[in-house]
Amino acid sequence: MPSSHEPSARTDFGSVTGGPTNTAAGASVATEANDPRLEVDHVLVVDKKNVRTAIGGTVVGNFMEWFDFGIYGYLTVTMTTVFTEGMPEQFKLLATLFGFAVSFLVRPLGGIVLGPLGDKFGRQKVLFFTMAMMALSTALIGALPTSQDIGLWAIVLLYLLKMVQGFSTGGEYAGATTYVAEFSPDKRRGYFAAWLDVGSYFGFAVGASTVAITSFFVENAWGPTGMVDGGWRIPFFLALPLGIIAIFFRLRIPETPAFDSAEEYHETLEKDDPMARHGIIGILRHHWKVVLIAMALVAATQSAGYMLTSYMPPYLEKTVGLNSTGSAVATVPVLVVLSISLPFIGILSDRIGRRAVYLIAVGTTLVLMVPAFWIMQQGGFWNVQIALFLVAIPVACYVSLGASALPALFPTASRFGAMALAFNLSVSLFGGTTGFFSQALIEMTGNNYMPAFYVMFFAVLGGIAAFKMDETAQRPLVGSMPTVETKEEARELVATQDENPLIDTSTMPIMTVTPEELEKAKAAAEK
């Protein structure tokens, strides 16, 4: 087998013919022990049970992250009253929306710090840390004094906690997508990875439902000003027990098999090798084109996603005229249906390719966004529902791909850091600021369609990037071994590796196994 890098064999593998020995990651590295050449590409065999455990542990983290976005988004108008007393009227809503923006502006710093740490020390350790930070900072928002208590210093404290959230989120989504992509079998990465964003959007729906239910009971018990008088704190306090549950699940997830199996391999590479581990400067030097492609795809995805989630509540209240409970309830059915659809779109991307689904997302954005906003502005519950479902169609296509397509663009050694850089820069500049800039454009122009035009602009950039990206469906991750679900698949892959056009052996570690090393490995496994 041709390869420019041939590290020594690992000792925690099992033979395809002799049965696998599970590693700590719940995977085995399969070799053809009877191959007379004794020089074959290793294949990672991931156990389905361990895949489910790994994905479940990351999904709860994303659920927690978006639960916070949901409660903050649906309490935006209430938070404006609570935290901006004494501020000029025209700046109040913008000041609260800036709380979203400031958290996203800090995200690149979190990515720059936490991404390389995830590449060096492991994905699981960083994901545990980000989850703990997110849960604690969200709960503390519920304990903040209001502007009635300390004036405009209240919103400064709010911004500080949103910055802590932004820092932790800078490592959360990039790490979670990296983790899920590396744990998923190559042929079904789109399906398994899509579950990560099921947690995201279901978390937002639960956050919205929590606000709606809390508003209903508080306003019935305390009167129409009940939420402003203190009821707004309840959803934030709920983040603490939910966070403890999420942290428990994070403690149970193993390290990814791709990270474990690549450690010794990457130690043999030259420091300037593009496949080696790099910090942020090295990532930009070796992978800047791919970083730009990823940023454009993230901008298209997140501008549409945050339009549907974070910005819709204040838009429906301020522009369409729904009350706070109505705006919260309106988006819940849409988000639930969207969440359910994601694994099915993930399966579609496994079959027809990531690029094709990205182009479907771009096309539906350009066709549906303006009609959706026109229908929305007609008012009425059912008009709003139809409009939101139209907006959700391209959003579902976009977000189903994020965890499978984006990490696959980068090599294993620098994947966490590169994802953290590309994703967080783009989501900070173009995604999380969607609500702020959309509202600012409406204030400047008086045109209520500006949010639609904002999303359509980034869809065009995303379409260009989709044409430029490499197709990654059903292919091994760059710099990683092929990953399959069964020993039978491993045998078939090893038998046909010379003719398999989907495997680029120049980007994979080749393990050279001698008979003596094989016997030592078997003896170690038996012990």
Image (cartoon, rainbow, N blue to C red):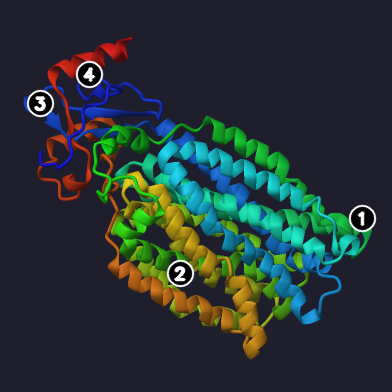
- Which secondary structure lies at badge 3? loop
| Quarter holding residue 35 | top left
Give the residue drawn at x 75%, y 48%. 140
User: Callout 1 environment at 10 Å: few (<14), some (14 to 19), or many (20+)?
Assistant: few
Q: What is the tally of numbered marks visible in this picture?
A: 4
Inspect this view and state whether residue 208 appears.
no
- Please indicate whether residue 378 sits to the left or right of residue 322 in the image: left
Q: Position of residue 513 (x, y in %)?
A: 16, 25
Quadrant in the picture for the C terminus: top left
- Which secondary structure lies at badge 2? helix
Q: Are marks 2 and 4 in contact (CB under 8 Å)?
A: no
Distance from the alpha carbon under mark 2 to that under mark 4:
48 Å
Q: Amino acid at mark 1?
A: Ala
Q: Is residue 47 above or below residue 516?
A: below
Which callout, 3 or 1, points to the residue nearer the camera?
3
Which callout, 4 or 3, points to the residue nearer the camera?
3
Q: Amino acid at mark 3?
A: Asp
Which callout, 2 or 1, points to the residue nearer the camera?
2
Residue 331 or residue 413, whichever sits in front: 413
Q: Which residue is mark 3?
A: 35
Which callout, 1 or 4, points to the residue nearer the camera?
4
- Which secondary structure lies at badge 1? helix
Q: Position of residue 136 (x, y in %)?
A: 69, 44
Q: Amino acid at mark 2?
A: Ala
Distance from the alpha carbon under mark 3 to that under mark 1:
75 Å
Q: Which residue is mark 2?
A: 300
Give the residue drawn at x 22%, y 26%. 9
Q: Are marks 3 and 1 in contact (CB under 8 Å)?
A: no
User: Callout 2 environment at 10 Å: few (<14), some (14 to 19), or many (20+)?
Assistant: many
